[in-house]
Amino acid sequence: MAISVKIRRMARSAPQITAKKEQIMNITVYLGSASGNHPKYRHEVIKLGTWIGKAGHRLIYGGSRIGLMGELAEAALQAGGEVIGIEPGFFVNSCLQHEGITKLIVTETMAERKAKLIEQGDAYIAFPGGTGTLEEISEVMSQIRLGHNDRPCIIMNLDGYYDPLRELLDHMVREGFLDEDSRNSFLFLPDIESIADVLG
């Protein structure tokens, strides 16, 4: 189920987006399997998973049982939500998959995994993470830029974690390598409450 959104020209500080409310959404969350160096990441990822589950949405994620990925999946499950993991076979062979999730989709390659994470999602959230998270959300942004995707693309900018990325995107606009409409469709939101307000 794809939920389309209309992105208008907007102020950076107050993005406006219209989405269909009160519907079950497949929410793809990109994040790392590491835990980070501060307990706030675990605390906030549990809040995110809990909100997804309690709101009746379905979590789509990378399938791992370790680090923040495992915390996210467990929180969504504990809140009564469905969780679909998408993981390449070599991770499964290393026993990194979460055994308690609703469904595990096993892919042959990382590229196939990335494509399925996009395909399955009605909205995308990048939680603080590393280079893999950045690669995955960049693919979503590229699809939006090309007009191949019109679903919500949210960067959870917890305590300014993604400020450097926001500054880079603004720099691309100033230098003529990214149009302003595309830039404005990448929503930098600071917390779960603002994400819930956008997605419903």
Image (spheres, rainbow, N blue to C red):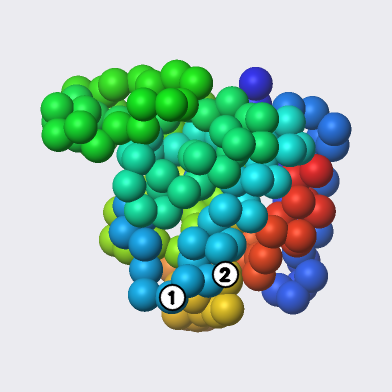
Residue shown at 50%/55% (left/top)? 126
* Image quadrant in which the N terminus is located: top right
Earlier sequence position, callout 1 versus callout 2: 1
Query: Considering the numbered disc 2 on the image, is that residue within a helix, a strand or a loop?
Result: loop
Q: Position of residue 58 (x, y in %)?
A: 61, 30
**Within the image, what quadrant is residue 35 found in?**
bottom left
Asked if residue 7 is positioned above or below residue 90 in the image, the reply reads below
Counting other residues with Cα less than 10 Å from the Cα at mark 2, is it few (<14), some (14-19), or many (20 or more)? some
- Camera-nearest residue between 93 and 14: 93
Residue matched to label 1: 38
Q: State yes or no: discs 1 and 2 in contact (Cβ < 8 Å).
A: no
Query: Residue at label 2?
Result: 157
Question: Residue 13 or 81: which is nearer the viewer?
Answer: 81
Query: Would residue 121 be visible to someone looking at this image?
Result: no
Kindly identify the residue that appears in the image at 45 percent across and 38 percent down: 61
Q: Closer to the observer: label 1 or label 2?
A: 1
| Residue type, mark 1 in image | His
Q: Position of residue 47 (x, y in %)?
A: 64, 55
Badge 1: residue crowd in 10 Å (few <14, some 14–19, many ≥20): few
